[in-house]
Image (spheres, rainbow, N blue to C red):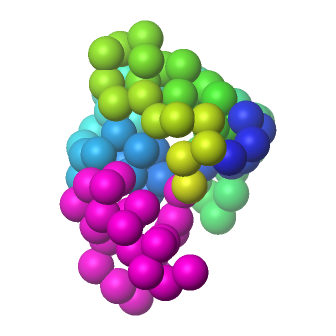
Amino acid sequence: MQPDQPLGIREIAILAEVSDDTARRWRDRGRLPPPSWPGTANGQPVWSFADVKDWLARTGRNAPRDDAPVIVWKRRPRPKTLVEVLAATETEG
């Protein structure tokens, strides 16, 4: 994944291996780093992969590898862990 890859709340939740609601609470309580770019995408703030990765490592949460894929699931249940995301990638690819 590129360091400047944009991430939304769902992708942050997948990388941190938490629920979307937990990632939203982090945002609402000011625990996430400031958004990486001014403005929003679809009305939501956007962070860079590098900023999120650094924040996860600094706060002792699960820091993803540089080459970790981020998959946005549409019309499917969101996997519970990054391991499931990686497994799904291997079986679909």
- What x and y, as percent, mark residue 66? 61, 35
Vertical arrangement, residue 80 with respect to residue 55, above or below:
below
Which residue lies at the image location 28% right of the left edge and 39% below the top edge? 25
> Of 26 and 66, which appears nearest the observer?
66
Q: How many marks?
A: 0
- What x and y, as percent, mark residue 82? 35, 53
Which residue range is magenta in the image?
Answer: 70-93
Relative to 21, is 39 on the left or the right? right
> Of 71 and 30, which appears nearest the observer?
71
Which residue lies at the image location 42% right of the left edge and 44% below the top edge? 15
Residue 8 lies in magenta, yes or no?
A: no
Residue 80 lies in magenta, yes or no?
A: yes
Which residue lies at the image location 43% right of the left edge and 11% below the top edge? 58
- What x and y, as percent, mark residue 29? 32, 27
Vertical arrangement, residue 39 with respect to residue 87, above or below:
above
Q: Does the image show residue 24?
A: no
Which residue lies at the image location 31% right of the left edge and 16% below the top edge? 60
Where, quadrant-wise, is the C terminus in this rendering?
A: bottom right
Relative to 24, is 71 on the left or the right? right
- What x and y, as percent, mark residue 45? 60, 45
Residue that sits furthest to the bottom in the current view? 75
Q: Does the image show residue 82?
A: yes
Vertical arrangement, residue 14 with respect to residue 90, above or below:
above
